[in-house]
Image: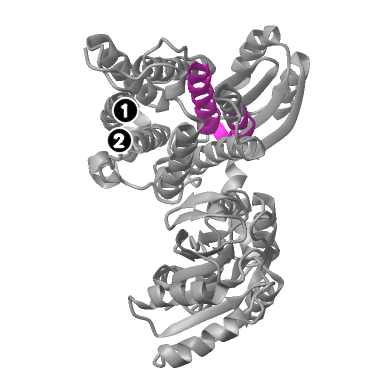
Amino acid sequence: MDTVETGADAFRVRVVLRFVDAATDALSEAREEIDALNVYPVPDGDTGTNMFLTVSAARDAIREAVDADPDLALPDALAQFGRGALLGARGNSGVILSQMLGAIADRLARARADERQAVVLAEALQQAADASYAAVGTPVEGTMLTVARAAADAAVALVAERDDVLGREVFGVAAAAAREALERTPAQLPTLAAAGVVDAGGRGVSVILDAADRVLTGRRPPPARESLGRHHIPVPTPGIDLSEDGPAYEVMYLLDADDAQVPALRERLGRLGDSLVVVGGSGLWNIHVHVDDVGAAIEAGIAAGRPHRIRVTHFADQVAAAREKVAHRSGRAVVAVAAGEGLAALFAEAGATVVPGGPARRPSTGMILDAILGAQSAEVVVLPNDRDSVRVAEIAARTAEEDHGLRVAVIPTQAQVQGIAALAVHEPGRSFEQDVLEMTATARHARHGAVTIAARQAITMAGACEPGDVLGVIGGDFVIVGDDRDAVARGVLDRLLGGGGELVTLVGGADDAGLAGRCADYLAEHHPVVDAVVYDGGQERYPLLIAVE
């Protein structure tokens, strides 16, 4: 028999983090497509957004836990992941998804040393499907439940047929089965067939499984239009044609209650409305239901325990409220994360709303959301200017769009100098799409580098370094290790200009000691056809930031 992967050691925290990042990115990219497919159970156009926000909350929870304790044991990390999904679940689809993710996390956390990885993964998918059906008051086929069940059944069948299955094969089979099941959803649910779309929640499940398959195998899923076939028909103006026959309100709340109280709560809420989903356990529950009597739904929670974080949405007013919010705003704004006082002044002078950030003090989702709302504009472009802040900015952007009706685009700038380049071509007179396109293209074509000082002993792509060594960085990778700042800076400049360039931007840090100015002199002597611009950025840890355009 071929060697197979066994034991809990096969499930590393770093692999889980890669999956969570990949799933978050994939849902971010597919969010608008999934929103457009949303016609069931209520055509309010938010399924993609809710699933994205739910996974984002789970990602933030496990990231924060691992950042606080890099040696955190896998079961503890998975527990934080599951709890984050539960607490951050949004909407009907998000609550169901949180139960799926929690079930998967629970099974992985209980993996024994003598268990095959493939079997554990298949059982995790099976438990996720079982949990999703159990969470819903009245399960309906042709939804995300059906897609999850098809994926689980395929995975279980695979490991039952062969005893040499590798873990990465499980998600490949599951993802393929999910795509096939998704194609069949219109035949199972008349509402989908009438609209000419596949199920939105099912598409979200398919996106997540494709992300997992890509993390484990590197395989890219089929293009969305190819995988959705003729059913990829966006629904025009979601939220306008709400059924008059269905409940008028969506009620959600977290509930602190003994598990024994939940069956009676399910029964009581089931009599009040539909789209009932109850997920959680061990004293903490997330409740979702569509009703006409909001007070009765909340009173049912009070009878069972302590409801909190209560959220009520009136479907008919949802779109009108969003439009009204936008009506009081006009124009376009730019929000930029700045890593130093000089950079903050530079962005502010160019008209941007500034959020303080930088290494060791990256902004939170709330800080970026406050800046977006504080800009008082109908359209907002966000420049995170840091690799680790891009996802935070995306979550803030999606929240601003869903809850406040704004139009927000995040340009994934990964360096301060990319943000400077993008802001330089910002033109409010252009259409929103064209402005975002121009800013994105400019940022992408701005090659960036930096000079920093090693804080600890490490092995880099350029070799070993000791505390105090000078490190040259290009595109986020260490390419030079030296002991002289000027020599390292010149080396970075020469490498960046090796691919051509007309304009070099030099941003001096808090302890630059004239380095940026000396680099400008070096360029004038050795690269005379290149223009150089020098700014005082005031950023910590990086004596010099460089961009070549």
Q: Is the magenta stretch mostly helix, strand or loop?
A: helix
Q: Name the residue under label 2.
A: 217
Q: Which quadrant of the view contains residue 541?
A: bottom right
- The kind of residue on which mark 1 rests is Arg
Magenta part of the protein: which range? Answer: 83-109
The residue nearer to you, when weighing 515 against 96, is 515
Q: How many marks?
A: 2
Q: Quadrant of residue 121?
A: top left
Kind of element beneath mark 2: helix
Whether residue 422 can be seen here: no
User: What's the coloring here?
Assistant: one colour
Can you give x and y, in whole percent of width and height, for residue 361 in the image?
A: 69, 55
Callout 2 touching callout 1 (CB < 8 Å):
yes
Indicate the quadrant containing the C terminus: top left, top right, bottom left or bottom right: bottom left
Of the pair 353 and 32, the residue shown nearer to us: 353
Crowd around label 2: few <14 · some 14–19 · many ≥20 (10 Å): some
Residue type highlighted by circle 2:
Thr
Seen at 46% across and 19% down, the residue is 8
Report x, y in % for residue 43. Answer: 47, 39
How far apart marks 2 and 1 lie (CA) works out to: 6 Å
Q: Which mark is residue 429?
A: none
Residue pointed to by mark 1:
168
Image quarter where the N terminus lies is: top left
Asked if one can make out residue 73 in the rendered structure from this viewpoint, the answer is yes
